Image (spheres, rainbow, N blue to C red):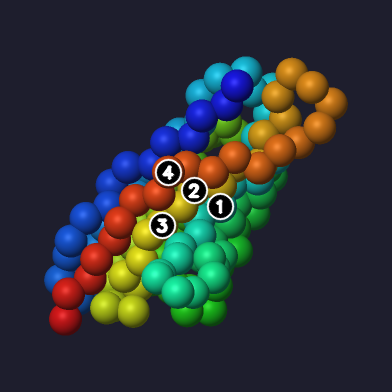
Amino acid sequence: QVQVVESGGGLVQAGGSLRLSCAASGSIRSINGMGWYRQTPGKQREWVAGISSGGRTNYADSVKARFTISRDNVKGPVYLQMNSLKPEDTAVYYCNMRVLGLGPYEYDYWGQGTQVTVSS
């Protein structure tokens, strides 16, 4: 069993910063990808940033140069440093980890979500 837990959301004024954290626990042999997604009411969940097992990072155009994804090591934790926040960044943010557990296949595990609210 694998659990993914996020933390670090909250309320911030436009232009401010927040740092989200995400850690996985359980029977994990490797984590082959980590990412952050976000979702607002009535919209589909959208990808925000990702980091591969090799450390390569990618970002959605809407957050490039403002957000930074990083990790402590190949099994996490993973972080999302969010700077220059805008009201349109308001969403529930979810951590995703692609985990190889004790079996032969990878599975995607999601955290419970953490609310980020940016006031104008």
Q: Nearer the N terminus, badge 4 or badge 1?
A: 1
Q: Mark 4 = which residue?
A: 112
Circle number at residue 95: 2
**104 w.r.t. 57: above or below:** above
Q: Dot 4: what SS?
A: loop
- Point out the frontmost of discs 4 and 1: 4
The quarter of the picture where residue 16 lies is: bottom left
Find residue 86 and name its label: none
- Give coordinates of residue 56: x percent, y percent: 64, 54
* Residue topped by disc 3: 93
Proximity of marks 1 and 2: CB atoms separated by less than 8 Å: yes
Residue type, mark 1 in image: Gly
What residue is rendered at 56% in x and 20% in y? 26
Q: Is residue 98 left or right of residue 80?
A: right
List x then y, in percent, for residue 14: 19, 76
**Which callout, 4 or 3, points at the residue further toward the start of the chain?**
3
Q: Position of residue 24 (x, y in %)?
A: 51, 31
Q: Which mark is nearer the camera, 4 or 3?
A: 4
Between discs 1 and 3, the one toward the N terminus: 1
- For badge 2, the amino acid type reads Cys
Q: Secondary structure at mark 1?
A: strand
Confirm or deny contact between disc 2 and disc 3 (CB under 8 A). yes
Name the element at disc 2.
strand
Which of discs 4 and 2 lies nearer the camera? The answer is 4
* Quarter of the figure that contains the C terminus: bottom left
For the N terminus, which image quadrant? top right
Q: How many angstroms separate mark 4 from mark 2 (CA)?
A: 8 Å
Q: Which residue is mark 1?
A: 35
